Amino acid sequence: MEADFLKYQAQTTPHPLAMEISHAKGSYIYDTNKKAYLDFVAGVSACPLGHNHPKVVNAIKEQLDKYMHVMVYGEYIQKPAVELTKLLAKHLPKSLEKTYLTNSGTEAIEGALKLAKRVTGRSEIIAANKAYHGNTMGAMSVMGYEERKQAFRPLLPNVKFIEFNNEAHLNQITSKTACIILETIQGGAGFIVPSNNYLQKVQKRCNEVDALLILDEIQPGIGRTGTLFGFENYNCIPDILVTGKGLGGGMPIGAFTASSKLMDLLQDNPKLGHITTFGGHPVIAASALATLQEITKSNLMKDALEKEQLLRKLLKHSLIKEIRGKGLMLALIMPSAEITNTLILKSQEEGLILFWLLFEPKAVRITPPLTISKEEITKGCEIILRILDTIQPH
Ligand SMILES: Cc1ncc(COP(=O)(O)O)c(C=O)c1O
């Protein structure tokens, strides 16, 4: 199987982890050698309820038995998508009422950028250094990491970059700006949280010049930071909210949400302002609805903050220089990229899944399912500390 994987399935790194999966349940993934791996990554923040949560699986099966794809986005009334968008609205501020469902996060970013242009009639977009918003052309245009995008230029014109958390740069948002797009917590950059009311100040500046604020919550959203969305922690409300990953409960999804006033502009001039075949797919929407219901009805969000405290208490070691992030979106900062690599690879051997961040080579990702138990957290931390004890810093 590994030979076929390398031969037929396109690879994006020369050294994929190449673990062959048998099945997954709760906080564990099992390989075809029957080895169990405790999952501290949750499919890169995409499985908030762990693997194969019974309520999610049932919702998918029930919907499968009724119907799958029947029509392109937005034409027919399909209960799972309607209920999902309604439940999102129930848990969002009034100004974030209408949601467009897409197939992936990057596609939701494309929709959000298009909407900002359509609303303002402006073309300038401001983004942040080291930002990651996805890998399609528009999303890549607002990625703040030149090395990974220069081969694909030309990208969108009129994109300017500022430094996240630097208030002095906010005067670059002007009456020429359609929107500023930011991750609520910068993910790929190393789980950088907004400080000193930064996002509130961004929103104020946007209001002064009638530019829109787009917040990308694809990673921090859906309960990971102790609230349903990260922005709830930072005294601001975006004009357009983008979500994805965890919303699908393990199925592929993205979404962008705005006021009806803004969103309705996609209906004309031109009509069909953003279209997709599969967006709002009933099986995916059923999975997302069951996930969102479970997260909003249970104590998982509140517990995420307690679990953060437990991780911070247990993960004390001379090689852990810092723990960044919030809730169950945490990154260990190691002394070097080599130590990060050693820890991640040895952990896999020891039955614990850790992973990298995109642009911060010293960071180790800890984004377990929100459903992880305190015992499982303790077990995973013991593995990390045991491995670190064997590593000599250079
Ligand atoms: C903050 C952020 N935005 C956008 C994306 C892109 O989402 P997708 O991979 O579903 O296209 C990601 C994925 O890692 C992300 O972390």
Image (cartoon, helix red, strand yellow):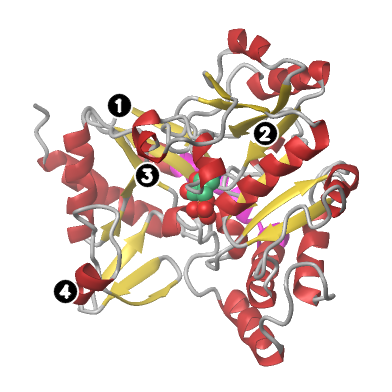
What is the number of the mark on residue 247?
Answer: none
Q: Amino acid at mark 1?
A: Lys
The residue indicated by pointer 2 is 233
In this rendered view, identify the residue nearer to me: 35 or 172.
Answer: 172
Three-letter amino acid code at the position of disc 4:
Ala
Kindly identify the amino acid type of the residue bearing the numbered disc 2: Asn
In the picture of the structure, the residue carrying the numbered disc 4 is: 3
Measured along the vertical axis of the image, is residue 43 above or below residue 394?
A: below
Quadrant of the drawing holding the C terminus: top left
- Does dot 1 land on a helix, a strand or a loop? loop
* Tag 3 secondary structure: strand
Which numbered disc, 4 or 1, marks the residue closer to the eye?
Answer: 4
Distance in Å between CA atoms under marks 2 and 4: 47 Å
* Residue identifier under label 1: 321
Rendered residue at 61%/56% (across/down): 300
Q: Are marks 2 and 4 in contact (CB under 8 Å)?
A: no
The disc at residue 365 is 3
